[in-house]
Amino acid sequence: MKRILLVSSLLFMVGCGSKNSEKNEKLKLEAASHSLFNLSTMYSDAEQNVSFPLWFNDSIIRARGITSVIRSVFEETKLDTIESKVSIPKRKLAYTFGKLGELKQLIVSNYYDDKVISTIKIVFSNHDENTGFSQTRINDELENADKEFPYIQMNVVLKNEDVSVYKNPLTSQRLFIIKNEKHWKPLSVDKLCNPNKNDLILFGNYKSPTKKYKVQNLVEETDVHNFEYVKSQLKEILWKDDPFNVKRSFKYDSSGQCVGFIDSTFSIGNFVSKMHYSIQLKDGIPISVQRSVFRDTKEIILFSENFEYTYKD
């Protein structure tokens, strides 16, 4: 009898080990074929809405065992020398992650001549896996820190199966997130939300939206952003920045990693300019991002970032 119980226990342990191994392999596979950045939120105004800290792919953070990321942003006017690239950041963002890959803390430090002039510390808690919303506690450690990093903080107003509603207590602007496609029509939106012209409507979910816009008089849409996907991979974001139209086109390598994107600007259908973002990868994760334009075939760097990672022991 004891021998039977021992064999059963061993089989159970082997089975559990096999399942855990399969789960780990699945996570590793996802980490190798998806981008670390959530491309619908990074490098957009969604970075300012700290109530939805969805800038990184939590599955990849968890699979890689990443505990923190240091993101150093370099002054545009100081990219002429190697020394400035290495030692004089304009801003540093220190992200700290929990066991499930969720963001637990963000510290934003702003610099002038290599000296910290302001710091903002944001602590995240009660992360809602369904909506991406987190409770936030913010500490501006130095005066006017919010001017250097103009963040948006929101409160939950309502959540039900049709719509989630959030409100900025400083401006009273509301954010309506409508998941179900059957409600993505003007009359349904008006009935569910009764929005004013400053409120923001989002179709889908905050992490991977289909459309974001403002509306008045039922059908007069403004500040429209459309997101286009192919097999869950973000391919384009289209928006209007009066009097221009902008198209952000993403580039991926053969493994599915994003290696950059291009913002193309048009006016009355005519091409105006392009902005290039290049993402340098190492072992499948970004180590630098560079924004540049080409003038007379010469590349002019406008923006540069470096990323450093800390891993579990």
Image: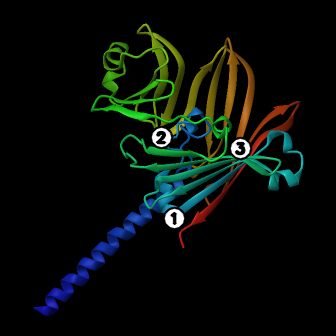
Q: Position of residue 41 (x, y in %)?
A: 54, 38
Label 2 to label 1, Cα distance in Å? 22 Å
Q: Position of residue 203 (x, y in %)?
A: 41, 28
Say which label, 2 or 1, has the lower sequence index. 2
Q: Is residue 111 left or right of residue 31?
A: right
The residue that mark 3 highlights is 278
| Disc 2 residue crowd, few under 14, some 14–19, many 20+, Cα 10 Å | many
Please identify the residue farthest to the front as the structure is shown: 143
Say which label, 3 or 2, has the lower sequence index. 2
Label 3 to label 1, Cα distance in Å? 25 Å
Residue 65: give its label. Answer: 1
Q: Is residue 190 left or right of residue 236?
A: left
Label 3 to label 2, Cα distance in Å? 25 Å
- Amino acid type indicated by mark 2: Phe
| Disc 1 residue crowd, few under 14, some 14–19, many 20+, Cα 10 Å | some
- Amino acid type indicated by mark 3: Ser
Q: Please tell me which residue is depicted at 46% across the width and 37% down the height of the picture.
A: 208
Q: Please tell me which residue is depicted at 31% across the width and 20% down the height of the picture.
A: 192
- Amino acid type indicated by mark 1: Gly
The residue that mark 2 highlights is 52
